[in-house]
Image (cartoon, helix red, strand yellow):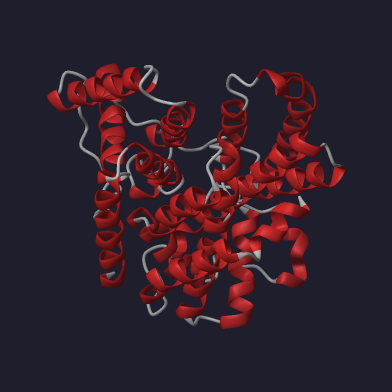
């Protein structure tokens, strides 16, 4: 892990810090919006730090979610800034900068890219227009935190499997637990990405099946115990009253929204609603056809292992957007925040194929940067 920590202070981290900070600097003067009024101004998601233990045994704000780490960050900001909104936005931006640095470390190991390629991919993630909602709205801070701590846990996990040090294992424990306590999707993301990491990697299968499984079960048990104490009811959000055709069709349409936003340099519209759509709708058919074609191409001989893994990464990290476990919002651009790492990797891998892609991706970065300054 020491080698990875040293990398944080080398030039890639400095470049990421400057680029990501500058591209999001205009967000600092934003005020409180939407749920921020209740969570921050009315202190529904803020607790007294002197009563630290209570945070871990209480639901998040006025919800039935269990996110004590988000409450802690809100409470620290409130202690420092009071109700000065720019302070909260500065924290969001700095968390996103840190997440971009861990994305760089994650990409190097997970996708086996060079230092320069990993830096390009991390920059694309850092300035991606899908970051505007999690970074620009305080109420979407859970998305930044779960992404940051999930990436940190996976970086520690990779280090553990490379060197088998107890320090790396403890860092994995801690980071994974912080991710779980930030947002519920970590329950799926961490195990799923560890499985993808071991995809066709026979050398690590034994270690994965024993220590990793035991570690994950221990963490999930601890999380489940704390969750049950804070919120005895397992889940309180009901599924929409749709028939089978509408349940499938609407979710596939939501996937289409996210898949078109991920490669786009245009800032997506803020929308968390979706039209109820039957499976026979032509847009659903077109999405299914496009996904099948993409997967067939992904597993063809024309793609390499890194490209294949990048596509699978995008699909895996997009699965929470399908609302399989009912959530208040079925369709929202923030679901594309974590998968944007995958598109950064894919864009970077295209640079290996032909010089022509340098112009396309260069134009994409310029267009995205221009849009960021206008937000």
Residue at 41% across, 31% down: 311
Q: Quadrant of residue 43?
A: bottom right
Q: Compared to 211, does 373 lie above or below?
A: below
Front residue of this view, candidates 56 and 114? 114
- Which residue reaches farthest right? 166
Q: Compared to 2, does 353 lie above or below?
A: above
Q: Position of residue 236 (x, y in %)?
A: 51, 37
Query: Which image quarter holds the C terminus?
Result: bottom left
Residue at 24% across, 56% down: 363
Q: Quadrant of residue 140?
A: bottom left
Residue at 64% across, 57% down: 69
Q: Position of residue 169 (x, y in %)?
A: 80, 41
Left or right of 335? Residue 44 is right
Front residue of this view, candidates 106 and 134? 106
Left or right of 310? Residue 161 is right
Residue at 42% across, 49% down: 337
Q: Is residue 8 visible?
A: yes
């Amino acid at each position: 892990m020491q080698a990875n920590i040293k990398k944080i202070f080398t030039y890639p981290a400095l470049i990421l810090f400057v680029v990501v900070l500058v591209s999001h600097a205009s967000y600092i003067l934003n005020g409180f919006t939407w749920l921020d009024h209740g969570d921050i101004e009315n202190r529904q998601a803020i607790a007294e730090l002197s009563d630290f233990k209570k945070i871990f045994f209480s639901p998040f704000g006025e919800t039935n979610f269990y996110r004590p780490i988000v409450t802690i960050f809100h409470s620290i900001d409130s202690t420092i800034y009071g109700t000065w909104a720019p302070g909260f936005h500065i924290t969001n931006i700095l968390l996103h900068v840190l997440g971009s640095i861990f994305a760089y470390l994650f990409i190097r190991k997970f996708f086996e890219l060079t230092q320069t390629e990993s830096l390009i991919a991390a920059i694309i993630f850092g300035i991606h227009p899908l970051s505007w909602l999690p970074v620009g709205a305080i109420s979407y801070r859970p998305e930044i935190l779960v992404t940051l701590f999930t990436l940190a846990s996976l970086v520690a996990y990779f280090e553990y499997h490379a060197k088998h040090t107890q320090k790396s294992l403890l860092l994995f424990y801690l980071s994974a637990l912080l991710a779980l306590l930030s947002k519920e999707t970590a329950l799926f993301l961490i195990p799923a990405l560890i499985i993808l990491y071991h995809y066709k990697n026979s050398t690590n299968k034994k270690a994965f099946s024993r220590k990793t499984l035991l570690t994950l079960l221990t963490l999930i048990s601890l999380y489940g115990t704390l969750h049950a104490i804070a919120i005895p009811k397992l889940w309180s959000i009901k599924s929409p009253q749709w028939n089978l055709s509408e349940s499938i069709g609407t979710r596939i349409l939501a996937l289409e929204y996210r898949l078109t936003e991920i490669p786009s340099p245009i800032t997506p519209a803020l929308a968390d609603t979706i039209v109820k759509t039957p499976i026979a709708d032509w847009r659903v058919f077109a999405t299914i056809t496009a996904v099948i074609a993409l997967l067939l191409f992904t597993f063809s001989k024309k793609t390499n292992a890194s490209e294949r893994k990048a596509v699978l990464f995008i699909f895996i990290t997009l699965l929470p957007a399908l609302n399989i476990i009912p959530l208040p919002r079925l369709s929202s651009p923030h679901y594309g925040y974590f998968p944007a790492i995958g598109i950064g990797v894919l864009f970077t891998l295209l640079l290996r194929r032909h010089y022509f892609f340098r112009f396309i991706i260069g134009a994409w970065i310029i267009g995205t940067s221009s849009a960021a300054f206008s937000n």
